[in-house]
Image: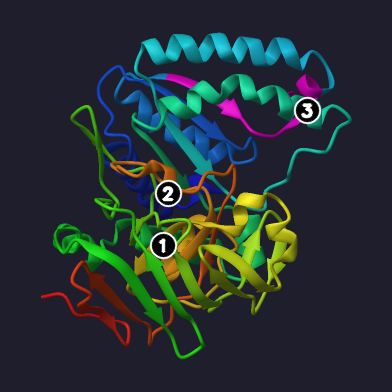
Amino acid sequence: MLEEDSILKKKISNYFDYVLKFGINIKENDYIEIVTTSYIEEYLSLLIERLKIYNANIFITFTDGDSLENIINGDYNTYIDDKVNMYHMLIQKNFKRLSIISPFVIPMARTKNAIEYLKQNYKLLFVRNYFLKNPHTIFPVANTYWAHKLQIPLEKLWDYIFDYSYKTSELEYFKDELNNMNLSSLHFKTNLGTDLYVKLPNQSLFLGKRWSSNGIEYQPNIPCLEIFISPDKYNVFGILKSSKPLYYSGIYINNYEIEFENGRVIKEEGLKDILSLDPNLYYSGEIALVLDFNPFLFYSTIMDENSGCHLALGNGYKEGVVEEDKINSSKYHIDLVFGTNDICVYGIDKDNNNIPIIINGKLQIK
């Protein structure tokens, strides 16, 4: 138990303090919603303990568990209407959100009303729009089920989370310099066979770990070892070959490959089931640069996407984009890691000059 391991408890407390300070930029008396699984009570109690230092007003939304299952099997319309009223109140209070990711804990059982319940969640879309411009963060929390899946001790999984979360990529320091290059496209090559050209919308910018809204800095994703940008959805060409497996919503896919033409996937190996979820998954919404490649599969996107350069099929980012019609839109966002230790990334500027950015896995920007 956590109480019996005071060293680990102290490390987790420090991690939660980091999430509160840099993730949501917490202030005294803030209104905070925690979105979490109900099966990590010990860690949730510790997080609440850290929040109380700031006299935070705390609201908890469970995404699973017996109580939610009973709601779905009962009067879920009243539950959702109550949530709508709650969120309207919280928006008036400029609330912030903490979303906990903790894979492989016991899931909510399927129920006869689950599909209808999910359909009614469209009433909460205004909350998603609110968080396009307000502080929120999503972050991982270890658990014994996840550690067992990875065949490592729980403490080792926590160490991975701490290491990834506290680290800052060299790319973050050069993000502004990359943005000043006015790149028109990117070219990616690996010895595994990836050969991919990605055109960028005019005046679009690379984004990284630190975001700002209304003068408030925050970090939407912890960890974040990438800088990323949304491509022109109609101008992606070439081949992407995976460098580590994809694990998405219980689906495990190894050695997948896709080919793009005019932005659209025209050939695929291994991704048929994924692409069938939404026609817009045939187009990309993100291309991300990550310096260090780690082939270890975490079975969690928030960790795996920070393990290598990747392209995401589906929804893109419109922050600061002028040509919004060129950004893909989807309810899905699925990251495909293709980065390797030998990856080469070139930027192509408006004058068609090739600018080395990463060569054989090493940053070339000085």
Q: Residue at the location (58% across, 22% down)? A: 124
- x and y, in percent, of residue 190 in the image: 43, 85
Is disc 3 surrounded by few (<14), some (14 to 19) or many (20+) residues within 10 Å?
some
- In the drawing, what numbered circle is on residue 55? none
Which one is in front, 232 or 157? 232
> Could you tell which of marks 3 and 2 lies nearer the N-terminus?
3
Q: Which residue is mark 2?
A: 326
Amino acid residing under circle 1: Ile
- Asked whether, in this view, residue 176 is left or right of residue 315, the answer is left
Task: Give the magenta part as a residue range.
Answer: 58-72
The image quadrant that residue 313 belongs to is: bottom right
- x and y, in percent, of residue 258 in the image: 60, 73
Question: Which-is-in-front pick, marks 2 and 1?
Answer: 2
The image quadrant that residue 299 belongs to is: bottom right
Kindly report the distance in space between the C-alpha atoms of the residues bearing marks 2 and 1. 14 Å
Return the residue found at the far bottom.
191
Q: Secondary structure at mark 3?
A: helix
Kindly report the distance in space between the C-alpha atoms of the residues bearing marks 3 and 1. 37 Å
Amino acid residing under circle 2: Lys
Q: Check if mark 3's residue and mark 1's residue have beta carbons within 8 Å.
A: no
> Could you tell which of marks 2 and 1 lies nearer the N-terminus?
1
Amino acid residing under circle 3: Glu
- In the drawing, what numbered circle is on residue 287? 1
Q: Residue at the location (51% across, 41% down)? A: 100
Q: Which residue is mark 3?
A: 69
Which one is in front, 352 or 164? 352
